[in-house]
Image (tube, rainbow, N blue to C red):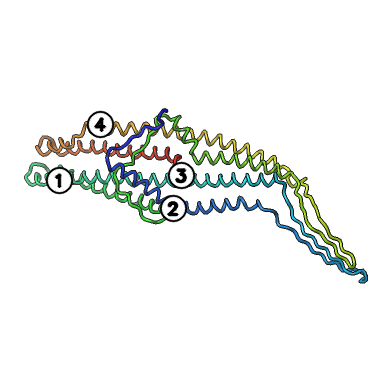
Amino acid sequence: MRKIFLFVLLATACSAWAQNDVERVLQSVEQRNTTLIALRHETEVAKVGNHTNLNLSNPEVEFGYLWGSPASIGHRKDISATQSFDFATVTGAKRRLAKQQDALADWQYRESRMQLLLEAHNLCLDVIYYNAMYKELSLRKSNAEEIAAVQQKRLEKGDVNRMEYNQVKLDLASVAAEMMRCNTERAAAMAELQRLNGGEPVSLETTEYPAVAIADNFEAWYEEAERKSPALAYVRQEIAVADKELAVRRADGLPTVSLGFMGEYVSGENFQGVKVGMSIPLWANKNRVREAKAQVEAAKARQTDARLQFYNRLHNLFVQQSGLHQVVKSYEEALRATDNTTLLKKALDAGSISTMDYLLGVRIYYDAVNQKIDANRAWQKTVAEMQAVLL
């Protein structure tokens, strides 16, 4: 059997812990998020409401007391009690409709859950990005501080001028400012995660992204995505509900039967017996079947549109993630082959290059590292959006 997924596993233990960390946060969000808790209650309320009209209608009891005139004829008392019944065809159609409506409520909840967990997942990826960037900036700051200390000694000896020394100090200040900005943005992402976690704080300190599975063949992967997608399942279920609604409307064309007791009591005479009635739906159900048929056609049209939009969106995401993955791999290969930071530092210490040449060289390398980290986050988010339908 052809493999659908090509698993890209990170070989370090940190990667495994990263996956566990993100999964742990998402599980916590699913349990504690107040929106999801409210939606779960609303789903249960909807299910109860779907079954409220399945019982028998209320019985009807009537009592009449009539005074006779002249008084010699006595008084008359009328008593009746009736219960209406639907045909079994109508009752069965309504029960089947209620079950389909229950399934629709479940799929609606799952779609809302998917969107909320995707939001939380993206925030987790942002936090990991800021963790990794802060770690990288910390190394740069340490290096910049070391260079600044050396250049200050060289300035005191007259080996460098004030302008070169100022450039080193400015580079150090720039790195420190980037660290502060990174911390601020990370704090904002963590605050959003806490909000999604029902106000409870979360912890996510890893700098490694979780291992991800990349689709090897889009069409094969899409078959599973289409089958599991809550959004598509919801529109499919809408058709099922509309079909059952049509069956109920057709069954409503059957008469409603009532059965009961009736008694008439007058002075010296009593009449009592069975009372049978029938409600014939001549006008009340007019155009309801036509409306139900139109709802079925509308549901089918929504499904066609939803499938087209879903396919195109996932196909675009697949192409996008494939391109971003290649970008990340290209950056990683280039950075491994062209890391000149150590050589630049040795050349600066030996006086072979100027301070400006050193700063220009490391900035080119640092820019490439930043681009790689940015591309990696973009790739991870694209894959997360693709896989959200499988949650």
Is mark 3 in CB contact (under 8 Å) with mark 4?
no
Q: Which residue is mark 4?
A: 334
Looking at marks 2 and 4 on the same chain, the residue that comes earlier in the sequence is marked by 2
Q: Most extreme residue toward the left, as rendered?
A: 157
Identify the mark at residue 214; answer none if there is no mark: none
Identify the mark at residue 33; answer none if there is no mark: 2
Q: Nearer the viewer, mark 2 or mark 4?
A: 2
Identified by mark 2, the residue type is: Asn
Disc 3 crowd, CA 10 A, few/some/many (<14, 14-19, 20+):
many
Secondary structure of the residue carrying tag 1 is helix
Looking at marks 1 and 3 on the same chain, the residue that comes earlier in the sequence is marked by 3
Q: Nearer the viewer, mark 1 or mark 3?
A: 3
Q: Nearer the viewer, residue 382 or 67?
A: 67
Q: Which residue is mark 3?
A: 114
Disc 2 crowd, CA 10 A, few/some/many (<14, 14-19, 20+):
many
Identified by mark 4, the residue type is: Ala
Is mark 2 in CB contact (under 8 Å) with mark 4?
no
